[in-house]
């Protein structure tokens, strides 16, 4: 049997495939995503508070470097094998170099279900992997454009990336959990700490509905992109596994890092790319990241990996 949170994703996927009238209202989904990000941050902050650990900055620097390297490696593959236009190749490389908060939450839940220990600073992996790929791909895009790219203010792009909702909630949650500890957060703990799996299950229900909607009808004309999206996690999981093992991370942290490197962004990257590269086809990126890679990671790849660690 799959973990209960994954079962909710499958339920949403089935409901979407059979064209049920089931839906999660937009405002409810926004509240769920806010609470889920805050919950992840607070859980990481509480671990730092209770264990009195210091953040291992060298580990975070190595993980951030990985976030810079992955999109650069993927770019020629997307251009030559998937045969995408230059702007779409840059867009999808940014999506796959960045990471999925939903995948992170699923990996965290599975690590807890399998009793795999998680390092106190693991929440920060999501923050430091979400931004570098987007920034480096946007910089490459505007460098290639030469004079045309000067119309875009890169400082504004940096500001938007570092002040995005996900980053603010995650880092704010870490700070709150670290400073206040279990006693200071006891009043809200039933919702943002103990309710983590409930929030994740409802979030994944909506993700299942969204995935079914994106993949209907079947995008046979984009078969190369679909094959890439299905196989990419099998290759991208290895950098996370190898780096995590090399750094001597806890098994749960290795699982989460590998899940992140195997994932693709469907929130932060689309927003940044849509604003900075208007010529890019965001629907292709969403088809690959949310329509193919996300469900395979959630249903197949990450649960299997969790059983092997």
Image (cartoon, helix red, strand yellow):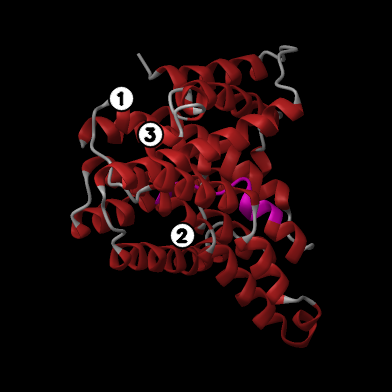
Residue at screen point 45% across, 48% down: 174
Taking 160 as reference, is 233 above or below it? above
The answer to if 176 sits in the magenta stretch is no
Q: Which residue is mark 1?
A: 113
In the structure shown, which secondary structural element does the residue marked by tag 2 occupy?
helix
- The label shown at residue 128 is 2
Badge 3 vs badge 2, beta-carbon distance below 8 Å: no
Q: Earlier in the sequence, mark 1 or mark 2?
A: 1
Question: Is 27 or 182 nearer to us in this picture?
Answer: 182
Sequence order check: which comes first, mark 3 or mark 2? 2
The C terminus, quarter of image: top left
- Name which quarter of the figure residue 180 lies in: top left
Q: Nearer the viewer, residue 192 or 300?
A: 192
Magenta part of the chain: 260-271
Q: Disc 3 marks which residue?
A: 182
252 left or right, relative to 228: left
Is residue 266 located in the magenta-colored stretch of the structure?
Answer: yes
> Could you tell me which residue is drawn at 72 percent across and 86 percent down?
146
Percent across and percent down for residue 11 are 55, 15
Q: Is residue 219 above or below residue 155?
A: above
Residue at the farthest bottom position: 147
Q: Earlier in the sequence, mark 3 or mark 1?
A: 1
Q: Residues within 10 Å of mark 3 (few under 14, many from 20)?
A: many
Query: Based on the displayed image, in which of its 4 quarters is residue 291 positioned?
Result: top right
Q: CA distance from mark 1 to mark 2?
A: 25 Å
Specify whether 18 is left or right of 193: right
Residue 193 in view in this figure: yes
Give the Cα distance between marks 3 and 1.
Answer: 21 Å
Residue 209 left/right relative to 114: right
Pick the quarter of the image with the N terminus.
top left
| Residue 297 appearing in the image | no
State which quadrant residue 115 falls in. Answer: top left
């Amino acid at each position: 049997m799959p973990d209960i949170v994954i079962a909710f994703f499958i339920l949403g996927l089935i409901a979407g495939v059979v064209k049920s009238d089931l839906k999660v209202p937009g405002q409810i989904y926004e509240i769920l995503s806010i609470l889920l990000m805050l919950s992840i941050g607070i859980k990481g902050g509480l671990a730092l508070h209770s264990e009195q650990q210091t953040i291992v900055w060298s580990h975070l620097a190595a993980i951030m470097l990985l976030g810079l390297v992955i999109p650069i490696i993927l770019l020629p593959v997307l251009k030559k094998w998937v045969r995408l236009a230059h702007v779409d190749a840059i867009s999808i490389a940014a999506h796959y170099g960045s990471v999925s908060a939903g995948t992170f939450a699923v990996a965290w839940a599975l690590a807890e279900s399998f009793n795999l220990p998680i390092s106190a600073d693991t929440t920060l992996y999501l923050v430091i992997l979400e931004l570098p790929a987007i920034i480096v791909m946007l910089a490459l895009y505007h460098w290639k454009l030469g004079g045309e790219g000067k119309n875009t203010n890169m400082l504004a792009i940096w500001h938007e990336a570092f002040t995005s909702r996900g980053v603010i909630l995650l880092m704010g949650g870490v700070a709150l959990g670290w400073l206040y500890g279990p006693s200071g957060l006891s009043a809200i703990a039933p919702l943002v700490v103990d309710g983590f799996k409930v929030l994740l299950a409802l979030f994944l229900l909506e993700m299942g509905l969204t995935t079914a909607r994106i993949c209907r009808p079947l995008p046979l004309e984009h078969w190369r992109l679909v094959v890439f999206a299905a196989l990419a996690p099998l290759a991208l999981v290895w950098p996370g596994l190898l780096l995590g093992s090399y750094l001597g991370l806890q098994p749960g942290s290795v699982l989460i890092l590998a899940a992140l490197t195997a994932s693709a962004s469907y929130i932060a990257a689309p927003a940044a790319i849509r604003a900075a590269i208007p010529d890019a086809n965001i629907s292709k990126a969403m088809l690959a990241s949310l329509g193919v890679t996300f469900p395979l990671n959630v249903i197949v790849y990450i649960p299997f990996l969790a059983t092997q660690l």
